[in-house]
Structures are given as C-alpha cells and as structure tokens.
Amino acid sequence: MLSTVYFPRSSHSPFNSATADSYCRWRDNKLKNYPTKIESLIVEIKSLSHMTAAEKTKIARLCHKTNMVIYAAPSSSKREELKKFASAFGLRNFDTNPLSDKDSLSSITIQDNDNIKKHYIPYTDQSLAWHTDGYYNPLNRLVRGMILHCVTPAVIGGTSTVLDPEILYIRLRDEAPDVVEVLSRPDSMRIPAHEGIRSQRTGPVFSYNASESKHFHIHMRYTHRTRSVVWHEEAVAAAAHLRTLLDAEDVPHIFRCRLESGQGILCNNVLHARTSFHDTPHYRRLFYRARFLERISDSNLKLSIRKY
C-alpha cells in the first residue's frame, strides 16, 4: 500500500515543531555514522537481476540510512533487468509520463530530432539545477522512488550531484525553523498549468509520511528553476533562504559522482543535479530513468534485523 502524505500535526511525529525531544532523537539517529565520502555509498553487485542476499541487505541498509545508494553492476542495457532490480526493492508502480518509453522507462539522451523532447532540459546536454523528480505531479502521485541507470556515460562532463533531503531538513530545522514551517505549508509552492499537459499543481516543499515499519520520512518537492514556479507570498523569503543554501552548497553530505556504464543511483527521490556534458555524433550519453510511486521497501532490511 502506498504511503499517504500528511502534515506534521501528530504529537509523536519528529517533524512537528512542538515535539523537540522527538525531533532531537530522530536527528541524532539520522546523523549517527552518516557517510561522509561518496565511496561509502557504492555497492558492488554481480548482476542486476540476480543479487545475493548480502548485496540486497547492504543496499537496503544504505537506503534506509541515506535514502540513496550507488550500485555498480556489470555493464548492461537490458531494460528488463533494471525493472527486476527495482522490483527487488519494492519499486513496482511506475510514474509514467507522456515522454516515457512504452515500458515506462525513460531514455535520457540528447533528442535533437524529437520536436517535443528537445525542448526539455533532461534531453539536452545542458546542466540540470537542483530538483526532485515529479515536483509538478499531483499530491496523490508523488514520485517517491527513482533509479538513474548509466548505459553510456558522456564523453566529457555529466557529473551528478546528490543530497539527502532529510540532511537539508536538519540544517534548516536547526538554524531556521521558521523556514521549515513555511515550506511545509500545503500552499507554499505552485506549479502553473501547462496547456495540454497538466493542470496547476499546488503543494508543500516538505511533506511527511510514515512507512509500514513506523519509520518517519520526509518527502521533498523542489525545483531550483525560477521559471514555471510560483511561491506563496509568505514563502518567498523561505524559498530564497533555501536557494542560497543550495547555491553555496552550504550543506553537509553533498556527494558528486560521474556514473560509468553499469552504475546507477537507486534512491527515494533525493535532491539531485547534473552538470552539462559533451558528446560526439557517434557516442551519445544514455541513461535510463525509472520513477516510482513507492519508496524503497524496508523488507530486505527487516529480514536482516530478524536474522541478526
């Protein structure tokens, strides 16, 4: 069953501004032994479609801690293997969009000859600023899980930058709690309608949900773009504060990686960005992107806890 969004009003939620003790316990547990180097996020696996129990457990533990993992598998362009890999972590309900391929994956590559895709930045060689995927989705179809899989890296550039939204939340909550409160308003961020594609979407930047295992999680809707986003008048200053932090990269635990063939990012839709890149006519950067309505399941983690 998919988690539902709720706002931090319950007395036991660590994200309720009135529950300082609960928040401090959650924060301390989050930060304890949090990885500080990109190498700590990488898990080598022998096969996307036939992982060992130990590989699954290691990936599950990292995702539970950091909301993301970088997997490194033998080079593969088999889309069914990637879907099987996703399914092993409970990611089965695709967020299909008009630009997806028929199997609900998206082939992220330069699309000069596609009259529609060439107007969207992911399908160009331009840089992508900080964002979470599907920030323009309705609240009942939030993109909670995601995979970015490298089939072919760029000749030059194309480095990914990632940040766990819960780390960003901690920075804001500790230093500017009023910013968190404003960005948790259900009307803080509005994405205008796009004729023929979507209606207007209004919702919070930070929303909150609890998994079946009773662990509390933060979901973030965000785009660093200044176009195609309208901030509530009471959220303008908060959005500017957040933007300044991200522009300065003045947040701990920002990781950078240039994925190679067979590597990918499995995550709970963390904040991410991409540098510009260069290709040649005969060597094109190609990534597969899969978006899901679920978070990464804790099922593999639960098994390891019961066992050990």
Image (spheres, grey):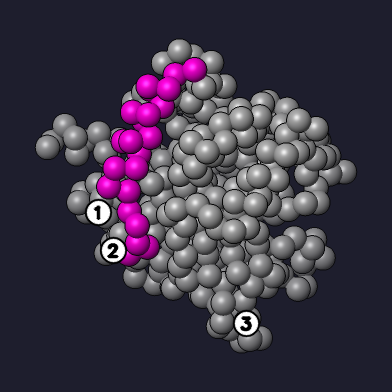
**Residue at 45% from the left image edge and 13% from the top image edge:** 11
**Is residue 24 one of those drawn in magenta?**
yes
How crowded pointer 3 is (Cα within 10 Å; few <14, some 14-19, many 20+) is rated as some
- Residue that extends furthest to the top in the rendered view of this protein: 11
- The local secondary structure at tag 3 comes to loop
Q: Residue type at mark 2? A: Glu
Residue drawn at point x = 40 percent, y = 68 percent:
262
Q: Earlier along the polypeptide chain: callout 3 or callout 1?
A: 1
| Amino acid type, mark 3 | Asp
Q: CA distance from mark 1 to mark 2?
A: 8 Å
Question: Is residue 160 inside the magenta stretch?
Answer: no
Residue 70 appears in the figure: yes
| Classed neighbour count for the residue bearing mark 2: other residues with Cα under 10 Å, few (<14), some (14–19), many (≥20) | some
Q: Nearer the viewer, residue 224 or 82?
A: 224
Observer-nearest of 133 and 229: 229
Q: Position of residue 259 (x, y in %)?
A: 46, 69
Q: Which residues are magenta?
A: 18-39
> What is the chief secondary structure element of the magenta stretch?
helix
SS type, badge 2: strand
Which is more N-terminal, label 2 or label 3?
Answer: 2
Which residue sits at x=33%, y=54%?
35
Q: Which mark is residue 3?
A: none
Cα–Cα gap, marks 3 and 1: 33 Å
Q: Which residue is mark 2?
A: 44
Q: In the rendered structure, which amino acid carries the disc numbered 1?
A: Glu
Q: Which residue is mark 1?
A: 55
Give the residue number, with chain letter if any, for mark 3: 279
**x then y, percent, for residue 215:** 37, 28
Residue 110 seen in this snapshot: no
SS class of the residue under badge 1? Answer: helix
